[in-house]
Image: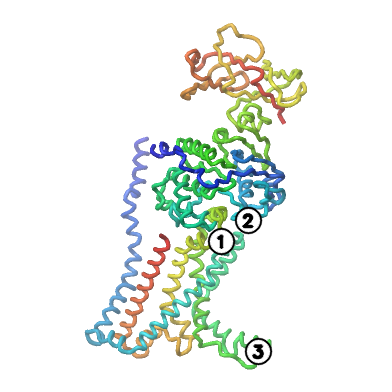
């Protein structure tokens, strides 16, 4: 617990000296082929304004790490350009790029002390001994590791190693910080505190960060913008709230946040609304994600917290956007309760935040589900 | 039924409960073998050096009194050092290449590295004589090409011995070094590059330090082999290339002076151990 409590940033004089701010990064039409000719990354374009965190979020093998490696210079794009602070860096070797990187396994040099690890990028830049001493102290203070400078990486805990890697990546004030699933090896509790720490450091040092993860919660927590990557291309990019509320595709909807899906056929489409007939004959009104035609097969997305659960006995019974079901499982989450509800033709999860007024249901209780049409996002099924 | 099954499980597990004690027994045959064919003879030899033909230190006094013996020892030491450095010079790039080559290519290269093991050192040394001799392949080729007018003497030079030993011992160096290099995490090299180190600095500051334990392991094996090398210097070397092993051989076979031979053997053993200790110390220092 010591570890988490000492994670607070105390603002150790970081802005002393000429602190170059994070720079803007632009990728334009970047492609990378595998030797067999298939795409690892295809015509990928993105732009990160200076001082922002962009997260590449996608399943493993989607090309996000390849993209990161091309930005760092460990891999070369087959076509396209990578521009950092207005300068095309795609043909510059990694050591001349001035980009910091935190690796998934931290990649700390095992034969060097913590001090020497953090001093490494400064020594490579020919800084004076005095400059190095103070910069290393400052960086270690920033991640709350003042006491361990003389230790070897293997003598540190995983969380401490992670912070050394972070200190090493920012000590030379890089124009861009790349992070490749840096929290993957940490336990849940520690991960949460390191996430806040990264966010705070980012604000304090005005860092531009490209972050790679497959953890959607982490992505939503950290990012100014999230780029959802699938099969080597960005399928949607935007602020977390926009992606959550208005996902552009079923893939994005399913990948970001928890979702319920109801399959059906479009009965009517007009005035920015569609009426969908479910297999049981009931009808649900929703918001179409794209223009639709009657007779089209669709899938309706409803977030668990947008499902309102009512007792079946009350006055509500018939009408649009009402579904009858039976509670099948009750999962207590602390601040909320999750009900898994069996319908005739589907199974939905509803999340109810606990308030004094909220009625509690038990397994087997008949319930009526209500959802607002604007919370039912309708996607065409490919 | 349940109980029977449980009892069976316990019975099956029982031998594993004290498997540490059992495992010690597995080493027993080797311990006995080593005791009989190594520890006892070496002990007897050590004893001989102090008792043959009469008890006393006279054999060791003789070693010191005649500078030739220590000279031979120094020459042997120098040969071992030169050959060790030579194998490192030629072997390190090969070991590195094996780690970066495509897997299929690396497999073939490793296979080729093992080919020399199929022939004994004696055969390989004779083969070198055939190549390097006055009427050998090399002289023939040079004569034919017109580089030389008459056959050169390539044999019986110190450099020839060194080269031959490097060639013979190379696999013993390359294999442990390759194993060590393969374990170096590639992301460390990327990290060093990303942090601003140009390739030469990545090698000097990260790759080389991390490969030192492997380098020392390989060098140690080669050094120990060199120190007792006998066949190659005998066949390929000149009069100046007498090694301590050859002197020992002469004492036992030619002079029939077992006491002095034993004293020389003890000296060789002590020097080898000292060399090993020095190298282990160095390796430990670099490992940090």
Q: Nearer the viewer, mark 3 or mark 2?
A: 2
Q: Quarter of the image holding residue B245?
A: bottom left
- B26 vs A207, nearest the viewer: A207
Circle 2 SS class: loop
Q: CA distance from mark 3 to mark 1?
A: 40 Å
Query: Where B158 sits versus A25, above or below?
Result: below
Spot occupied by residue B191 in the image (x, y as percentages of width and height) = 54, 53
| Dot 3 crowding, Cα within 10 Å, few <14, some 14–19, many 20+ | some
- B202 vs A274, nearest the viewer: B202
Determine contact: label 3, label 1, CB under 8 Å: no
Q: Quadrant of the C terminus of chain B?
A: bottom left
Same chain letter for marks 2 and 1? no
**Which numbered disc flags the more N-terminal residue, 3 or 1?**
1
Residue underneath mark 3: B143
In the image, farthest residue toward the right: A293
- Image mark for residue B99: 1
Colouring style:
rainbow
Spot occupied by residue B20 in the image (x, y as percentages of width and height) = 33, 53
Same chain letter for marks 3 and 1? yes
| Dot 2 crowding, Cα within 10 Å, few <14, some 14–19, many 20+ | some
Spot occupied by residue A181 in the image (x, y as percentages of width and height) = 54, 43
Residue underneath mark 2: A93
Spot occupied by residue B257 in the image (x, y as percentages of width and height) = 31, 88
Query: Residue at image x 71%, y 18%?
Result: A275
Q: Quadrant of the N terminus of chain B?
A: top left
In the image, farthest residue toward the left: B55
Q: Chain of mark 3?
A: B
Relative to B29, B212 lies left or right: right
């Amino acid at each position: 617990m010591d570890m988490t409590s000492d994670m607070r940033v105390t603002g150790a004089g970081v802005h002393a000296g000429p602190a170059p701010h994070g720079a803007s990064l632009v990728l334009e039409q970047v492609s990378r082929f595998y030797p067999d000719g298939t795409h690892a990354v295809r015509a990928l374009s993105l732009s990160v304004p200076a001082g922002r965190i962009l997260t590449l979020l996608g399943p493993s093998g989607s090309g996000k790490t390849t993209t990161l490696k091309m930005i760092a210079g460990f891999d070369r794009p087959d076509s396209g350009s990578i521009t950092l602070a207005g300068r095309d860096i795609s043909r510059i070797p990694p050591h001349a790029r001035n980009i910091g990187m935190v690796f998934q396994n931290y990649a700390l040099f095992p034969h060097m002390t913590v001090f020497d690890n953090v001093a490494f990028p400064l020594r490579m830049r020919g800084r004076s001994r005095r400059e190095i001493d103070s910069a290393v102290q400052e960086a270690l203070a920033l991640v709350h590791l003042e006491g361990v400078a003389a230790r070897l990486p293997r003598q540190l805990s995983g969380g401490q190693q992670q912070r050394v890697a972070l200190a090493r990546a920012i000590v030379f004030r890089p124009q861009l910080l790349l992070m490749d699933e840096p929290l993957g090896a940490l336990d849940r509790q520690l991960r949460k505190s390191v996430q806040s720490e990264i966010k705070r450091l980012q604000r304090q040092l005005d860092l531009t960060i490209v972050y790679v993860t497959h953890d959607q919660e982490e992505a939503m927590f950290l990012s100014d913008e999230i780029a959802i990557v699938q099969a080597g291309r960005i399928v949607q990019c935007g602020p977390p709230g926009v992606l959550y509320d208005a996902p552009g595709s079923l893939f994005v909807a399913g990948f970001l946040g928890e979702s319920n899906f109801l399959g059906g056929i479009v009965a009517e489409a007009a005035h920015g609304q569609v009426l969908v007939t479910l297999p049981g004959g009931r009808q649900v009104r929703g918001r179409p994600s794209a223009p639709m035609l009657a007779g089209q097969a669709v899938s309706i997305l409803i977030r668990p917290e947008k499902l309102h659960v009512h007792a079946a006995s009350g006055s509500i019974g018939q009408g649009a956007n009402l579904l009858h079901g039976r509670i099948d499982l009750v999962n207590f989450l602390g601040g909320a309760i999750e009900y898994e509800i069996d319908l005739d033709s589907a199974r939905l999860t509803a999340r109810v935040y606990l308030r004094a007024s909220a009625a509690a249901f038990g397994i087997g209780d008949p319930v009526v589900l209500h959802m607002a049409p604007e919370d039912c996002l309708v996607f065409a099924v490919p | 039924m349940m109980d029977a099954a449980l009892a069976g499980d316990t019975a099956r597990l029982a031998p594993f409960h004290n498997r540490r004690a059992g495992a010690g027994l597995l080493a027993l045959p080797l311990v006995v073998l080593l005791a009989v064919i190594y520890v006892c003879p070496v002990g007897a030899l050590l004893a001989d050096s102090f008792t043959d033909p009469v008890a006393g230190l006279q054999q060791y006094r003789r070693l010191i009194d005649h500078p030739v013996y220590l000279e031979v020892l120094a020459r042997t030491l120098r040969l071992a050092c030169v050959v060790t450095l030579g194998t490192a010079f030629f072997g390190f790039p090969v070991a590195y290449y094996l780690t970066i080559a495509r897997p299929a290519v690396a497999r073939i290269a490793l296979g080729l590295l093992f080919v020399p093991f199929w022939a004994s050192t004696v055969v390989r040394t004779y083969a070198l004589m055939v190549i390097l001799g006055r009427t050998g392949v090399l002289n023939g080729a040079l004569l034919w090409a017109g580089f030389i007018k008459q056959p050169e003497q390539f044999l019986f030079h110190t450099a020839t011995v060194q080269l031959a030993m490097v060639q013979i011992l190379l696999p013993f160096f390359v294999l442990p070094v390759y194993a060590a290099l393969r374990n170096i995490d590639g992301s460390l090299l990327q990290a060093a590059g990303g942090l601003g180190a140009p390739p030469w600095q990545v090698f000097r500051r990260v790759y080389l330090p991390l490969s030192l334990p492997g380098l020392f392991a390989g060098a140690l094996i080669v050094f120990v082999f060199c120190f007792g090398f006998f066949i190659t210097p005998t066949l390929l070397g000149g009069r100046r290339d007498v090694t301590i092993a050859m002197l020992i051989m002469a004492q036992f076979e030619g002079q029939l002076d077992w006491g002095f031979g034993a004293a020389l053997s003890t000296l060789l053993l002590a020097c080898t151990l000292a060399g090993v200790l020095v190298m282990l110390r160095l390796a430990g220092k670099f490992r940090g």
